[in-house]
Image (cartoon, rainbow, N blue to C red):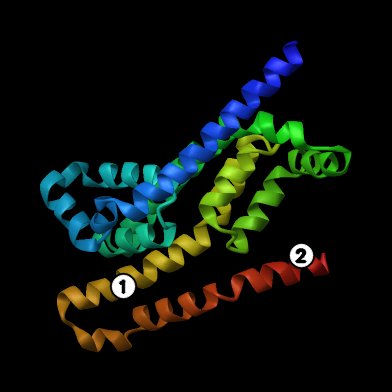
Amino acid sequence: MKESAGKKKAIGKAIGLLFFILGSIYLVRFTPIKEQLNVQSFATLVEVYGFWSPLIFILIYAVGVCLFLPGTLLTGIGAAVFGPYRGFIYVWIGAMLGASGAFFIGRTLGRDFAASLIGERLKKYDDAIEKNGFATVLYLRLIYFPFTPLNFGMGLTKVRFWDYLAGTGLGIIAGTFIITYFVGTLKEIWVTGNWEGLFSFKVVFSIILFIFSFFIPKLVKKIRKEN
């Protein structure tokens, strides 16, 4: 009886997770929220809230991650509004909070159901993720595995939260900095109108970093195979 009740509860929570994901996607794609995801809207936020605008942006980013908003879009907006350096800090914090929130949603609503589906064949992989959680998450972040699906997906596994958090924090630094530095640098030139700056070391370096970012997954996979 208890086992049956537990299974029904797990299924109920899994259905809740499914509705949450579908509702989030609908909210982002088919409501006016989509129209507010632009640089101008967030620039207005800075003008209105001033000192508190970074905190508000971080919270919006964190919630956005849980609602399946495109992380690259939010990162680009953060860099354009706050610049390459402050933008990087705010984006990284927002991404970490969002990744943590999505992980706990997945763990709370979906882990029991996922565990009930794991047979002997899959159990060894689940145990391996628990044992090597940090390395697994770090690797998946470095090869640019889709950010939000991984957040929820890891919540369904046995990975320990602190291993997940550390792997995420370290794994997204390079990609986040490259995008914010690239977008923020170009935005600074656009605002100042100093088009000669397009040939400056800072811009050339940002372009090199941006191009290099596309090769990071291949380099990581190659190093992993060699080891």
Quarter of the image for residue 122 reads top right
- Report x, y in % for residue 40: 18, 61
- Report x, y in % for residue 35: 24, 58
Helix, strand, or loop for circle 2? Answer: helix
Considering every residue shown, the one lying at the far left of the view is: 48
87 w.r.t. 155: above or below? below
Residue bearing the label numbered 2: 224
Foreground residue among 171 and 60: 60
- Report x, y in % for residue 30: 33, 53
Identified by mark 1, the residue type is Thr
In the image, is 188 to the left or to the right of 115? left
In the image, is 222 to the left or to the right of 22? right
- Report x, y in % for residue 9: 62, 21
The structure residue drawn at horizontal position 67% and vertical position 28%, both measured from the top left corner, is 112
Considering every residue shown, the one lying at the far top of the view is: 1
Q: Decide which of tag 1 and tag 2 comes sooner along the chain.
A: 1
In the image, is 139 to the left or to the right of 76? right
Q: Quadrant of the C terminus?
A: bottom right
Residue 66 visible in the snapshot: no
123 w.r.t. 37: above or below? above
Which numbered marker is on residue 61? Answer: none
Identified by mark 2, the residue type is Arg
Foreground residue among 10 and 147: 10
Quarter of the image for residue 192 reads bottom left
Residue bearing the label numbered 1: 185
Considering every residue shown, the one lying at the far right of the view is: 120
The structure residue drawn at horizontal position 75% and vertical position 43%, both measured from the top left corner, is 129
In the image, is 111 to the left or to the right of 47? right
Q: Quadrant of the N terminus?
A: top right
Residue 45 visible in the snapshot: yes
The structure residue drawn at horizontal position 46% and vertical position 75%, both measured from the top left corner, is 210
| Mark 2 crowdedness (10 Å alpha carbons): few <14, some 14-19, many ≥20 | few
